[in-house]
Amino acid sequence: MPVLLTDAQIAEGRARIVAVAERQAVELGLERLSMHGIARELGWSATALYRYFDNKDAILAAARTAAYDRLSDQLEAAMARPGDIWSRSREVGNAYVDFAFAHPEAYRLIFEFAQPGRGQYPELDAANARGRSNMIGYVEQMVAQGAVDADPVLLAHVFWAGLHGVVSLQMAGKLGPDAPPFETIRRDMVRRIIRSALGPTARRPIRNPAGEQR
């Protein structure tokens, strides 16, 4: 008869499984990820994993949930820092980039693979909604304060799409030796998007990386 696990043991075991699954999913691809492969790396039997999760999809949902929540923690911390909306919006962008490069497996798992449909895993749905709220919330504040004049949902997705694009290119090594540095591309992209959306209280010169007015 199997020994009953405490809540703490269950939480620890789930965390170990999720960490392995996160990395293996990116290294192997979702199709090649398996319960046997995860168990083998942990030194467990595949049967042991079923004490923590029903199947591989449940493991992936837990891994994605944890990744989304880690990203949201960083975005929310950035928005809570002191300063005006411009400085806090920069902090949000920095937090997003820092997360991507510090946790590339987690980043790719939540943004580069197909996700399960809504309603299958409520915790994942909640984590996804929290992440999207954080990606839009700071832009809503920019609009509310007159810093930009745009549909906040649309503008947030423009920022997100651009930032994800340049992050993904950098991760894939596609910004070759003839390309400008990652930060130069990123900052110029953001500056051009903001210039097109400046609101009535924020029409001011925008400086390029050399500090010259544009």
Image (spheres, helix red, strand yellow):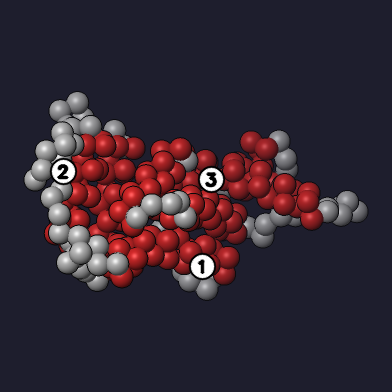
Seen from this angle, which residue lies furthest right? 1
Find the distance from the CA under tag 2 to the CA under tag 1. 40 Å
Image check: 18 left or right of 84? right
Dot 3 alpha-carbon crowd within 10 angstroms: few under 14, some 14 to 19, many 20 or more: many
Find the distance from the CA under tag 1 to the CA under tag 3. 18 Å
Instruction: Name the front one of labels 3 and 2.
Output: 2
Q: Nearer the viewer, residue 182 or 137?
A: 137
Seen from this angle, which residue lies furthest bottom? 119
Residue 125, which numbered label? 1
What residue is drawn where x is 34% and y is 50%?
A: 87
Q: Quadrant of residue 29?
A: top left
Dot 3: element: helix
Residue 207, which numbered label? 2
Instruction: Name the front one of labels 2 and 1.
Output: 2
Find the distance from the CA under tag 3 to the CA under tag 2. 40 Å
What residue is drawn where x is 33% and y is 57%?
A: 85
CB under 8 Å between callouts 1 and 3? no
Earlier in the chain: of badge 2 and badge 1, it is 1
Q: Quadrant of residue 142?
A: bottom left
Earlier in the chain: of badge 3 and badge 2, it is 3
Residue type at mark 2: give it: Arg
Q: Position of residue 159 (x, y in %)?
A: 27, 56
